[in-house]
Image (cartoon, rainbow, N blue to C red):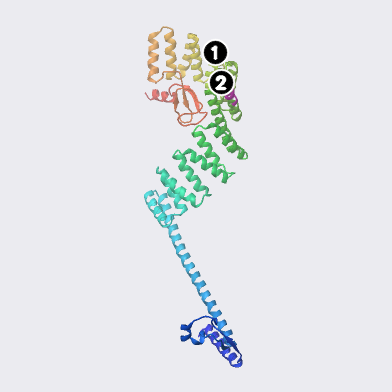
Amino acid sequence: MSRRILLFLSILLFSLYIIFLNKINVSLRILPKEWPLHILQEHLSTFTQSEPFNVPIVVIILISFFLGVMVFFLINTIQRSMILLSEWKTAIKRKKKERIERMFTKGQTSLLGGRKKEAIILFEKILRNDPNHIKTLCVLGDIFREEGRYNDAVRLHLKARSIDNKDPHILYSLEKDYEISNSFEESIALLKEIREIDKEGLVPLIRLSDIYIKNKQWEEAYMVHKELISLIKDDLILFEEERDRLSMISYEIGMSRFNIGDYARAVKRFKEAISLNNNSVPAYISLGDTYLKQAKERSAIRIWKKGYKNMNSIIFLKRIEEGYIRLRREAKVIRMYQDAIAQNPNGYLLILMLSEAYLRFNMLDDALSELKKVEEIYPYIPSLHLLLGKVYEKMDEIGVASKEYQIASEGDSSSLLEFYCKRCGARCEDWMGRCSDCNEWNTIDLRATGNLNADLTRHKGG
């Protein structure tokens, strides 16, 4: 017999004992006197009679007590039932969550193992069971983006964002969808939103700058990069890299001004680019070009000389030559190349450039003498034979000239110098501040037409 039954019997016996000792009655009426309940009175006359009847007071107390106990047990039973139901639902949700997490882990393993189709099937199954599983929405969206299914990627990442619009991973994934699908306005708006959430973060600024640069929105890129640099002053390596990048952006703004004839503002921007990066060939070159447009030849020559001194690029020598010719200072051209050769005696390209200058000023014997020096060391350079052909042609030695031209043509040489990118090796017809193939700044340089090493290898092999 349980303790509760014993307790109940004890209370019952005690109550009967109290009733026996206390005979006091109370006049009790169940219903109001004026209720006309004739039918009930016929069947339940005792409880529905209009006149009161006498009941021991202890009975009333006990009935009230037992009613309270019954109500208490009823409420307690309901509460326990609710708790059990809640625990049952929680257990079901936990098991479902565990099952989904196992499926997600299996999907990631398949993805890492190169079984993308299998991973997609698992991830899609997860979303059928739990459409709001954020990790699956993000990963499957990334997969769809890689496969070029940009609309599906955006749909999934937007769904994830609707569940948690503060998660940087979700926001960056969605931004990448927009960027790759060329939805740049949406991408820029989202990066600005991320920037508001993470005011000290560098990533949104860097990606904003990249998008502006990609779309040639130089003024916007400049403002973003100024803000970026202010946040990375303590990181010296990154600071220098981004400072150089800001220099190139300033250079591009200068070029946009140069192209519309706003030379005063172009000069200002090019000077700023040089102050940010003293080794920016494009800024020095373009600043000199702007001075030439303003008929300031001496200023142009002075800035190009400074650039050559800092970076030793022969592009500056060609520009300085142009400036001297405009001033009709041919002797200075010759002296410039002679001084450059004196500082770099083994620079065969400088000798070729000096020879070309001699040829330009009809100093044929001097040109031939310099070319013979190169021929003794590098006899297979196509540009060498092109110049020799021109010299012999001017000397009216047509037979010899034809032979030299033939050798030059075998080396695919139709000009002395060619512009090329030092980063990716691409050739370009004219100088530019930024390579059109790899989009890198400050990588265009000059070299003799034809690859010297390749020509030497080919002739040695032959």
- Is 130 placed above or below 381 here? below
Is 27 colored magenta in this rendering? no
Which quadrant is the C terminus positioned in?
top left
> Dot 2: within a 10 Å radius of its alpha carbon, few (fewer than 14), some, or many (20 or more) residues?
many
Residue assigned mark 1: 326
Specify whether 66 is left or right of 153: right
Name the kind of residue labelled 1 in the image: Arg
Q: Position of residue 260 (x, y in %)?
A: 53, 23
- Which residue is more in the foreground, 168 or 379? 168
- Which residue is more in the foreground, 64 or 275? 64
Specify whether residue 227 is in view.
Answer: yes
Query: Which quadrant of the figure has residue 321?
Result: top right
Q: Farthest residue toward the top?
A: 396
Magenta residues, as a range?
Answer: 264-268
Q: Position of residue 455 (x, y in %)?
A: 41, 23
Residue name at image x 54 percent, y 13 percent: 326
Q: Determine whether the residue tagged by mark 1 lies in a helix, strand or loop.
A: helix
Residue assigned mark 2: 290
Marks 1 and 2, the one that precedes in the sequence: 2
Q: Which is more foreground, mark 1 or mark 2?
A: 2
Residue name at image x 48 percent, y 83 percent: 38
Query: Which quadrant of the figure has residue 390?
Result: top left
